Image (cartoon, rainbow, N blue to C red):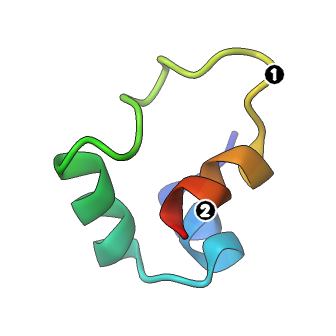
Amino acid sequence: MLTISRLATHAGVTVRAVRHYHRIGLLPEPGAIGPDTGPTTLARSCD
């Protein structure tokens, strides 16, 4: 399971930034991610 902290580290952003991106709709709801969506795909969403 990918935690918000690991996602932030992988993307080179802060946890606060990941939460902001989620709040404004740039990241999907947790659990709404398909099986072929990995950490790299999610991290690219933060760029």
Horizontal relation, residue 26 to residue 10: left or right? left
| Labels 1 and 2: the sequence-earlier one | 2
Q: Amino acid at mark 2?
A: Leu
Q: Nearer the viewer, residue 25 or 4?
A: 25
Horizontal relation, residue 5 to residue 40: left or right? left
- Mark 2: which secondary structure? helix
Determine the residue positioned at 43% across, 30% down. Answer: 30
Figure quadrant of residue 6: bottom right
Using a 10 Å C-alpha cutoff, classify the residue at mark 2 as few (fewer than 14 neighbours), some (14 to 19) or many (20 or more). Answer: some
Residue found farthest to the left:
24
Can you say whether 1 is above or below 45 in the image?
above
Using a 10 Å C-alpha cutoff, classify the residue at mark 1 as few (fewer than 14 neighbours), some (14 to 19) or many (20 or more). Answer: few
Q: Amino acid at mark 1?
A: Asp
Can you say whether 20 is above or below 23 in the image?
below
Mark 1 touches mark 2? (CB < 8 Å): no
**Of the two numbered discs 1 and 2 in the rendering, the one whose residue sits closer to the viewer:** 1
Q: Residue 19, how many percent across, how many down?
A: 28, 60
Determine the residue positioned at 31% across, 58% down. Answer: 21
Q: Residue 17, how many percent across, how many down?
A: 33, 74
Determine the residue positioned at 69% across, 39% down. Answer: 1
- Mark 1: which secondary structure? loop
Q: Residue 3, how many percent across, how many down?
A: 57, 53
Assign the C terminus to one quadrant of the image. bottom right
Can you say whether 2 is above or below 31 in the image?
below
Q: Residue 32, how many percent across, how many down?
A: 48, 17
Residue pointed to by mark 1: 36
Determine the residue positioned at 76% across, 16% down. Answer: 35
Residue pointed to by mark 2: 7
